[in-house]
Amino acid sequence: MKKKQNLMIFIGGAIIGIIGALLMHFGNPGNMGICVACFFRDIAGALGLHGAKGVQYIRPEIIGFILGAFIISMATGEFRAKGGSNPALRFVYGFLMMIGALVFLGCPLRMLLRIGAGDLNAVVGLLGFIGGILVGIVFIKKGYSLGRNHDQSKLSGLIMPIFAVILLVLALAKPMFINFSAKGPGSMHAPFAMSLAAGLIVGAILQRTRLCTAAGFRDAVLIKDYHFLYGIIGIVLANAVLNMALGQFKLGFAEQPIAHSEHLWNFLSMSLVGLTAVLLGGCPIRQTILASQGDTDAFMTVIGLICGAAASHNFNLASSGKGTTPSGRVAVIVGLVLVAIAACYIIAERKKGAHNGK
């Protein structure tokens, strides 16, 4: 039974890796067939939350992720409106997670796809991501927890799918108040219908497999469960094979698309992403899927991601192919310190509560 489950999640990951390579081949930016952080950043720009002209587009892949996961969760009876587990702190974690991702230039899923395309800078990011996860595991072992969630109004759980439908209408109608990039990464995209269909497939796969990039490494270390790692391996291998077949594979550090080679900051920025992902209970794509099936805590994390994307470009925190910015480097360090302080405070608070018999 376990072997079958591992095979299924490997196949699911492989399909995601193939889709990532195909979306890039048909128009998405280089090594960015799928990137949750970048796509939410583009949506934030399209909605006028930041003024970076080159990264403004309503990405249909995000719409597909949400609706695909929502439809499957409704069909299987897994949709459940729940929340109330430190939503404000989850917003802050999501905000800081996005800053880390945009200093690195990609979410954990794009990190895997960059590796599958030969970008060795992403390997440095992977090491940082794992490092952040290991620190998070230390906090978990010491008693860190955001607490239990509770049942919510079904309407609350529907906010994320409603948001996706609104985005779909805006993307199709293209009203004057929505921004679309004329050049830059935001202007580069696969055909709309293809991207939407790809998103629906990926959303459905992620909902059924519960695949999470952070959980793969967390569970391997914490409980010696390697199930999710099979999905991660599937993503990278299938993506690499198809990239080679399509002539999209380039091994090395230099001249990689939408990437930089400042290794210290690739490491530290993804450490921030890995740490926040473990403390939240899921990476950006996992938070998106959870929010799509009724988890209002995950929805608050997604709102944090969107606001973090807006702040990253409004305050010059985001990196570019030329490298990181001074303010971005400071933001990563401050983020790591703030998250560590928050985790320590929660641990101390829980120990105090246990000592008092609460």
Image (cartoon, rainbow, N blue to C red):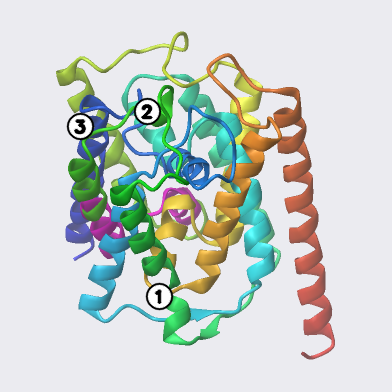
The answer to which of marks 2 and 3 sits earlier in the sequence is 3
- Looking at this view, is 6 or 92 the one in front? 92
- Decide: is 230 above or below 146: above
Of residues 116 and 357, which is closer to you in this image?
116
* Tag 1–tag 3 contact (CB < 8 Å): no
Which residue is painted at 24% across and 69% down in the image? 71
Q: Residues within 10 Å of mark 2 (few under 14, many from 20)?
A: some
Q: Which residues are magenta?
A: 201-220
Q: Which residue is mark 2?
A: 187
In the rendered image, the quadrant that contains the N terminus is bottom left
C-alpha span from label 2 to label 1: 30 Å
Q: Which residue is mark 1?
A: 158
- The amino acid type, in three-letter code, at marker 1 is Leu
In screen coordinates, is 133 left or right of 173?
right
| 208 is within the stretch colored magenta | yes
| Residue at the extreme bottom of the image, as rendered | 357
Whichever of callouts 1 and 3 sits on the residue coming sooner in the sequence is: 3
Q: Which residue is mark 3?
A: 22
Q: Residues within 10 Å of mark 1 (few under 14, many from 20)?
A: many
**Residue 18, disc:** none
Q: What residue is shown at x 60% (from left), y 79% (from top)?
A: 84
State the quadrant of the C terminus: bottom right
Give the x, y percent position of residue 58: 39, 44
Q: Secondary structure at mark 2?
A: helix
